[in-house]
Amino acid sequence: MQYETVFILTPVLSDAQMKEAVEKFTKVLTDNGAEIVNCEEWGLRKLAYPIQKKSTGFYSLVEFNADPKLIRKLETEFRRDERVLRWLTFRQDKYAAQYAAKRRARRAAQPQAQPVENKED
């Protein structure tokens, strides 16, 4: 079955710590037989309401195919990790999976922003 999980990490982490946390959760999935379809880091964003007296957090999205029993293990890991503020995992129906595939294709087709060269006269 295809699943999608979004989790919010505490904003006090460095970029390296944030990436390590995301890798930890994707490793939990792959070690238990899940296939990672897509992994996106949305970066630091403002929360709709404060969570643990924090107003921002690092958002991450992971789409994966897995056995339904794996979801309980993943959510147990989320609960045990103090870096995670919130998470939401849900099963994608066929329409959500089609939309996610279109969104990934659209993101892949967009040209990446080129750095602007600073020219002095």
Image: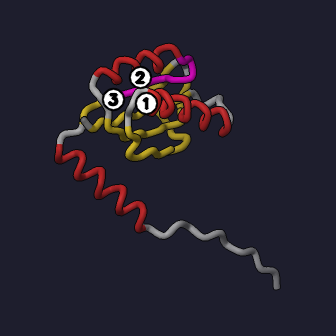
Residue lying at 25% horizontally and 33% vertically, measured from the top left: 91
Whether label 2 touches label 3, CB < 8 Å:
yes
Q: CA distance from mark 2 to mark 3?
A: 9 Å
Q: Nearer the viewer, residue 104 or 59?
A: 104
Q: Which residue is mark 1?
A: 29
Q: Nearer the viewer, mark 1 or mark 3?
A: 1
Q: Dot 2, crowdedness within 10 Å: few (<14), some or many (≥20)? A: some
Where is residue 118 shown, x and y percent of the image? 75, 74
Residue lying at 29% horizontally and 58% vertically, measured from the top left: 102
Q: Residue 74: which disc?
A: 2
> Which residue type does callout 3 highlight?
Thr
Q: Nearer the viewer, mark 2 or mark 3?
A: 2
Q: Quadrant of the C terminus?
A: bottom right
The answer to whether 35 is drawn above or below residue 54 in the figure is below
Quadrant of residue 43 in the image? top right
Q: Quadrant of the N terminus?
A: top left
Q: Which residue is mark 3?
A: 89
> Which residue type does callout 2 highlight?
Leu
Q: Dot 1, crowdedness within 10 Å: few (<14), some or many (≥20)? A: many
Where is residue 6 shown, x and y percent of the image? 40, 34
Among the two numbered marks 1 and 2 on one chain, the one whose residue lies closer to the N terminus: 1
Residue lying at 60% horizontally and 38% vertically, measured from the top left: 19
Q: Colour scheme of this structure image?
A: secondary structure
- The secondary element bearing badge 2 is classed as helix
